[in-house]
Structure formats: structure tokens, C-alpha cells
Image (cartoon, rainbow, N blue to C red):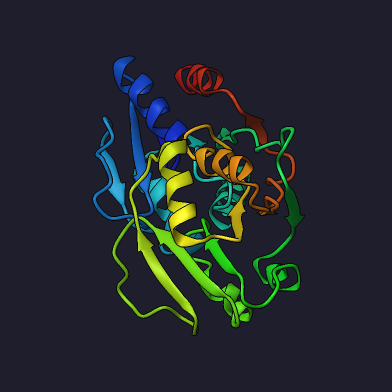
Amino acid sequence: MTLLLLAGSGEARRIAVALAQAGADAVASLAGATQRTKPLPLPTRIGGFGGEAGFTAYVKEAGITAVLDATHPFASQITVRTAGICAELGLPYLYHLRGPWVAEPGDNWRDIDHEEDAAALIPLGKTVFLGTGRQTLDRFANLQGRQVICRQIDPPTAPFPFAGGRFLVGRPPFSVAHESQLFRELGIDWIVVKNAGGEASRTKLTAARDLGIPVLMIRRPPPPEGAQITDSVDAAVAWALLQ
């Protein structure tokens, strides 16, 4: 058995640790979107596979016998591709998908389907905090007329893609106190996030609730149809060890 762990989430790191401790025959894969990533305790390949053909070739050449997908909930292109190829090849496939955030009393959230939808809800002249990362930043180009601040982990390698915006570099985790102070200092009026779930990054939402800042929550893409899914790290590890 050689298991392929598609990593990229905090849960993937916990899964990797458990598999390494169990002595599992497994290899991890990281897309390489973030620099200076903490190494995983498994043999790790970094970078894309080169599309469907490249992924299929890798799986065959590496002797992969099962795939555990623990990528980010919004890495839908990777997930849909992987689930489809595993189905075609007859490889066992499990998608670890952590639960979404759910609004609590005092939260002022509005759900939207796409990044472009934010402009219809945020008035001109407002200061907007984007906690959505840089990969989809260009989709917010219609937010011109607002001050837009996009936080990302790595220093920017190109100018902000539209007028009125700037980058803010910061590496998580962030405490609620940190986020509250930051939002006050920046004069944030609106926050836009993807509904990625997870307790570690929920602190900005708690800070928004405490400060009365409205949040636009981008809905998740649907999971692959027919895929086996779990939201439990323990269940994912148990599945992997049975393959």
C-alpha cells in the first residue's frame, strides 16, 4: 500500500503526523502555493502534477494504491479532478472536508456565491478587509471605489491588481485580540472571507462580531458527486491505515 495524502490544510498536517507515527507507507503532496511551509513528517512532493494527464501518470508511476484528499475546502479544481481520476482507475478515494463555519448569535453575516458579488453589497468609500488570499484577488476588481486590504502569508511578488488596494502580510495563527486591534487600527467597515471552516482561522470572525463589523461569507463549492467524505481526522486516519 502506498497512500497519497493531498495536503494543504491544518487537518492534513494532523493526518500526516498520525500516519507517520503509525509507520504507514504514505507520501504527501503540497501544491507549493505558500512559501516557507513547515515540513510534513512524510516524504513530500511539492508542486503541481501538470493537469489530469500528469496526475494520472504520477499515480501509476509511484504505485499509489489509495488517495486521501485533505486539501483546502476551496481547492475544488484539485478535488474534482482527483475524485474523477480515482474513480476511473478504481483507486480508493476519501475526501476529508472539515465542517463549515456557522453563524452564532451576534454575527452579522451575508452569504454570497462569488467574489464578484461583494461589490453589490459594500457601499462606495468603505474600507474592506479581504481574508480570501491572493489567488482569487483579481475577482474583486469591481470593488474599485473602496479601500481594499488583502492579507496574505507571503510578501507580494506583483503590484496590487486594481486601484485602491494594498497588501497586508501576516502569518497565522492570529488571536482574537490581535484581529480586533488590527481591524480597529485599519478602520475596517466590511470583511470578506471564504467559508473555509476551522477553529484556528475563526478568530477574525469572532473579532468582527465583537466589533459589529458585517461579514460577507463566500459559500463553498460543492464536493465531488458520489465521493466518500468525512469531517473527522480520526476517521480519515483509520481509513488510510486500512488501505
Q: Is residue 225 left or right of residue 7?
A: right
On-image quarter of the N terminus: top left
Which residue is the extreme one toward the bottom? Answer: 163
| Position in image of residue 183 (x %, y %) | 49, 53
| Position in image of residue 47 (x %, y %) | 33, 57
| Position in image of residue 113 (x %, y %) | 74, 60
Query: Eyeballing the image, is 64 above or below 234?
Result: below
Query: Eyeballing the image, is 132 above or below 17?
Result: below
Q: Nearer the viewer, residue 231 or 122?
A: 122
Q: Nearer the viewer, residue 41 or 165?
A: 165
Query: Eyeballing the image, is 117 above or below 225?
Result: below
Q: Residue at x 55, y 49 (%)?
A: 82
Q: Is residue 1 visible?
A: no
Q: How many marks?
A: 0
Q: Residue at x 70, y 69 (%)?
A: 122
Q: Nearer the viewer, residue 88 or 238?
A: 238
Q: Nearer the viewer, residue 104 or 154?
A: 104
| Residue 231 placement: quadrant | top right
| Position in image of residue 219 (x %, y %) | 70, 52
Query: Eyeballing the image, is 182 above or below 10?
Result: below
Q: Is residue 29 left or right of residue 146?
A: left
| Residue 172 placement: quadrant | top left
Q: Is residue 30 visible?
A: yes
Q: Residue at x 35, y 30 (%)?
A: 26
Q: Residue at x 47, y 37 (%)?
A: 176
